[in-house]
Amino acid sequence: MNSETRSREFYVLAIFFALFVLFLYGPLSAILILSFQGPNGGLTFPLNGVSVHWFINLFQTQAVGDFGGSFRRSLMLGLMVMVVTVVVSLLAGLAFRRKFAGATALFYLSVASLVVPSIVISLGIGVLFQQIGLQPAWYSSGFGAHLTWTLPFGVLIMFAIFNRFSPAYEEAARDLGATPWQTFAHVVLPIIAPSLIGVGLFGFTLSYDEFARTLMTAGTYNTLPLEIYGMTTNVTTPVLYALGTVTTVFSFLVIAGTLGLIVGMSRRRNQG
Amino acid sequence: MATVRFLGVGEPKPKRVIKLPSWLPAYLQALPLTLILGGFLLLPILMISVVSFWDYDFAQMYPDFVTFNYTETLGSWVTWKTYLNTLKFAFIVWAITLFIGFWVAYFLAFHIRTSSMQMVLFLVCTVPFLTSNIIRMISWIPVLGRNGLINNTLVGAGIIPQPIEWLLYSDFAVVLAMVHLYTLFMVTPIFNTMMRIDKSLMEAARDAGASGWQTLTNVIIPLAKPGMAIGTIFVVTLVMADFSTVQVMSGGQSASVALMMKNQMSLLQYPAAAANAVVLLIIVLMMVAAILRVVDIRKEL
C-alpha cells in the first residue's frame, strides 16, 4: 500500500470515526452524570451537588409507577423471548439447509416480519386478541409481538452461519459412524454455539428494549420500556435519568457477560 | 440423512426400524417459525385489512363493509401532509445514515489492519444499539435543551447572545435522534459486504493506475452496493414506522404516519387506524420491493 496517501485518508477517517463514537456515547454519558444530580438539581446541567438521592427515590414505589414490577416483567419476557428465539431460529436454520416446499415463501415472510412497521403488528395483534375474546397480556400477545421482531434477526443470522458452514465436518462424523443426532450434538452444535449465544443476546436485548410492539399488546401490566415511555411525558425530575442509568448499566452487564462467555468459549476451544 | 450404510456394518439394527421419511425433518424444523409468523404476523395483518372496512363509534367497532375509513383518511389534506412529512424524515435520515455508515464501515474494513481491533471497534459501535431506544432518545434532552449543554457552552463562550431554540423539540432534533438511533443498521450490512471484498481487487486497481478516488467509485462502491441496499431497507422501514422519536423529540410539533395511527388508537378509532396501517404497509412494502430489485438478500447473507 502507498503509505503516504493512506496516512492522510486514515487520519481524516479516524477523526470521523472518533466523532461518531463521541456522538454515540456523549448523550448517554450526559444522563449518566446527571443521574447523580443533587436533591435540588434539575433536568439539565450544571450539577447541583452530587448525590444518590434519585437512585433511592427510584426504589421508593410512589416516585415512579411500578419500577420493580415492570423490570421483573421485562426481564422474564426477555428470557422467554431469548430461549424461543434461539431454539426456533436454530430449527429454521437447519430446515433452510435442505430444500422444502415453501422455503422461499417462509424466508420472505421472515424478511417481511422485519420490515412491517412495528405499530402495525402491535395494532393487528391487539385487535386480533380483542376479536377472539382473549385478554392481551405481556406473556401472550406481547410475547408473540416480540417474537415477530427477534425471530427474523435470529433466522437471518442462522441463515448466514449455515451459508458458511462446511458440510465436511458432518460428513466426517457420519463416516465415523455417528448417528444424525450425535452428529448434531457433538459436531454441529459446538461449532455454532458462539453464534447461538449471539442470537440469544440479540433476542434478549431486542425484547428487553422493545416498546412499539408492546404498546397494544402488553395488556394491564406495563413492561419497563412502556413505563419509561410514560415517564417521559410526566416525570420532570432526574429520577428519570436514574432509571435510565440503571437500565443501561443492566444492559451493559448483560452484553459484557455474554461477550465474556463467547470469548471464553472460543479460547477454550482453541486450547482444546 | 440416515440412509448412509457402511461397508461391513450390515443391515441396520432392528430397533431403528421407525425411520422418518427424509423429507419430514425439514418441515418439522420449519414448523415453529411458520406457526409463530403465521399467528402473530400474517393473521394480525389479515385482521387489520378486514377491520379497516368496519364501522365504529366512540366505544366499539361493528363488522360491516364501509370504505369511509379510507376515503376519510386519503381525502384529508392533513393525512397527505403527514405522509409527506414521514417521507421527508425517511429521506433525510437515509441520506445522513448512508453517508456516516459508509465511511465508518470503510474505515473499519480497510484502514484497521488487525481483525481483533476491527472486532473491538465494531463492538464499540454496536453496544449502544443494544440499549434502550427511549433512554438514548431522552439522553439528548440535557444536551440540546434551552439550558442544555450546547446552549450553555455557546452562550458562555459568547458565541451566541441567547440560547438557540430550535435545537430541541424541532424537526432537527427528530432527525438527529433518528440518526443516533438507526445508524448502526447501516454500518453493519455495509461493513459485512466490505469485509468480503477481495483486497487484491484494490491492489489491481492501483496497479492499473487508478487514483484513490477512482478505486473508491469504480471498485468499492459498486461492490458495497448490496450492503447499502440492505442498510437502506432497515433505515427506511424503521423511520417510516417511527412514532416515539417524532413524538418525544419534536415535542408534539411534528407528525408521522405511525404517530397519527397511535393517536387514533388511543381514541379507540381502530378501523381508522387500521386503514392507515394498510396504506402505510403498502407504501413500505413497495419501497422494500423496489430496493430488493437491486439486491438478492439470500446471496448476501
Image: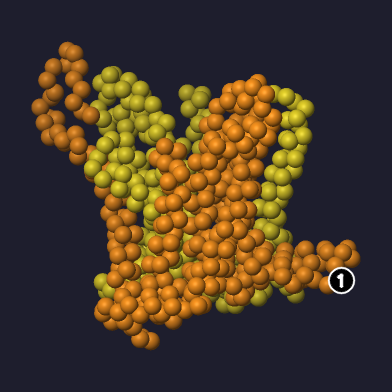
Check disc 1 and give the amino acid type: Pro
Circle 1 is placed at which residue position?
B161
Single out the residue that lies furthest toward the top: B8
Figure quadrant of residue A191:
top left
The colour scheme used here is by chain
Residue shown at the point (39%, 62%) measured from the top left: B282
Q: Report the number of numbered marks.
A: 1
Where's residue A271, x and y in %? 51, 24
Q: Does residue A131 appear left or right of residue B275 in this picture?
A: left
Please state the chain letter of the residue tagged with numbered disc 1 in the rendered image. Answer: B
Where's residue A124, x and y in %? 36, 67
Location of residue B78 with respect to A211 vertically, above or below? below
Hue used for the chain lettered A: yellow
Q: In which quarter of the image is the N terminus of chain A?
A: top right
Where's residue A176, x and y in %? 28, 19
Q: Does residue A252 appear left or right of residue B71 in this picture?
A: right
Q: Does residue B278 appear left or right of residue B233 in this picture?
A: left
Figure quadrant of residue B172:
bottom right
Location of residue B109 with respect to A47 vertically, above or below? above
Single out the residue that lies furthest toward the bottom: B58
Residue shown at the point (60%, 34%) measured from the top left: B218
Q: Is residue A270 visible?
A: yes
- Secondary-structure class at tag 1: loop
Residue shown at the point (36%, 70%) measured from the top left: A126
Residue shown at the point (32%, 68%) measured from the top left: B49
Where's residue B46, x and y in %? 30, 65
Hue used for the chain lettered B: orange
Q: Which of B52 and A173 is in front in this view?
A: B52
Q: Can residue A77 be seen in this view?
A: no
